[in-house]
Amino acid sequence: METKCFVCGNADTTVVYLKCIHEGKEELVCVRCLPILIHGAH
Ligand SMILES: [Zn+2]
């Protein structure tokens, strides 16, 4: 699986990524984007 954040497109492997399901698809999100997801700021 490609290590890439689906929110910001970041592929920096020094950042922690978490697995999540987005629109039925398994995606990775970096911890920097987690607050954005949690607060729903889009
Ligand atoms: Zn990100």
Image (spheres, helix red, strand yellow):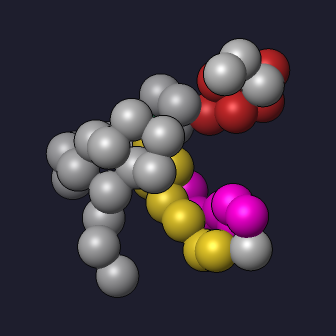
> Magenta span has 19?
yes
- Which of 16 and 35 lies nearest the eye of the viewer? 35
> In this view of the protein, which residue sits in the foreground, 32 or 8?
8
Residue 30 is left or right of residue 42, and the answer is left
Q: Position of residue 27 (x, y in %)?
A: 54, 65
Seen at 79% across and 20% down, the residue is 39
Q: Main secondary structure of the magenta part?
A: strand
- Image side of residue 28 versus residue 13, left or right: right
Q: Residue at x 32, y 57 (%)?
A: 4
Q: Is residue 36 above or below residue 24?
A: above
Which residue appears at 28% of the width and 42% of the height?
A: 10
Q: Position of residue 29 (x, y in %)?
A: 51, 49
Q: Residue at x 20, y 45 (%)?
A: 12
The relative height of residue 35 versus residue 8 in the rendered view (above or below) is above
Q: Position of residue 32 (x, y in %)?
A: 47, 28
In the image, which residues are magenta?
18-23
Nearest the eye: 38 or 42: 42
Image quarter in which the C terminus is found: top right
Q: Is residue 5 left or right of residue 38?
A: left
Pick out the residue farthest to the right. 39
